[in-house]
Image: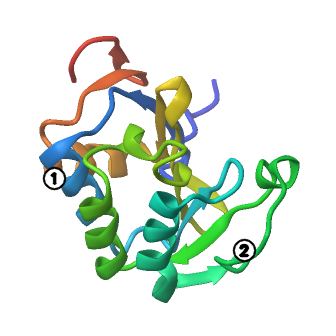
Amino acid sequence: MHPRKPKDSRQTYTWYLDEPRGETYRQLLRFAVGRVDRATLRPLGTINPRCMHVFNKLLPHQIGGPAVNAEISDSESRRKRYIYRFDSDLAKKLSELAEGIFDWEWPDRPTDLVLLRGTDDWLASVAHEQLCSMTMTKDDFALLCSAVPSLQVQSGPGHRGGHR
């Protein structure tokens, strides 16, 4: 008989969430500070004045992607991402510019907020499809659930719809 191998505590899993809105959204962004390196957003076409306001507010944090005033064709926009340094100031701005994850939808805002830890998605969203997922270890997810008790999990390890 072979001894059982211990489970890898660094193994990551994905949980699908109901939309974090209001205070849940703000708590989630605050929790991400120090755990996430970057945030990304996409344009989905010609940038209108409402969306330009958002890009201008985020400009001090931009570390990659096209210039805010760059002409981007509709076909190019689906491949472009604006990349931002994630810190407490950006978390605060993201929470002021939207009331929830699915508010990051074209044409009023750039779309599909993603928070990255290294090269891996930590939080990924597709606003027009109302999808939001988080990928992390089970221990990190337990910490997240303690810090953001109102987070609603649709599915993932240990969850089969409904609430945590």
Question: Which sits in the foreground, 108 or 7?
Answer: 108
Could you tell me residue 8's position as x and y percent?
54, 47
Identify the residue at image location x=64%, y=68%: 82
Could you tell me residue 89's position as x and y percent?
30, 81
| Mark seen at residue 89 | none
Residue 19 against residue 77 in the figure, above or below:
above
Could you tell me residue 120's position as x and y percent?
63, 57
- Compared across the picture, whether 70 is left or right of 59 comes to right
- Compared across the picture, whether 63 is left or right of 37 comes to right
The numbered mark, 1 or 2, whose residue comes first in the sequence reads 2
Identify the residue at image location x=50%, y=35%: 127
Q: Quadrant of residue 142?
A: top left
Identify the residue at image location x=47%, y=88%: 60
Question: Which sits in the foreground, 163 or 58?
Answer: 58
Identify the residue at image location x=26%, y=12%: 162
How far apart in space, not on screen, are marks 1 and 2 (Cα)? 32 Å
Residue 11 against residue 65 in the figure, above or below:
above
Which residue, given by chain and number where applicable, does mark 2 sit on?
Answer: 65
SS of the residue under disc 2: loop
Where the N terminus falls, by quadrant? top right
Where the C terminus falls, by quadrant? top left
Q: Amino acid at mark 1?
A: Ala
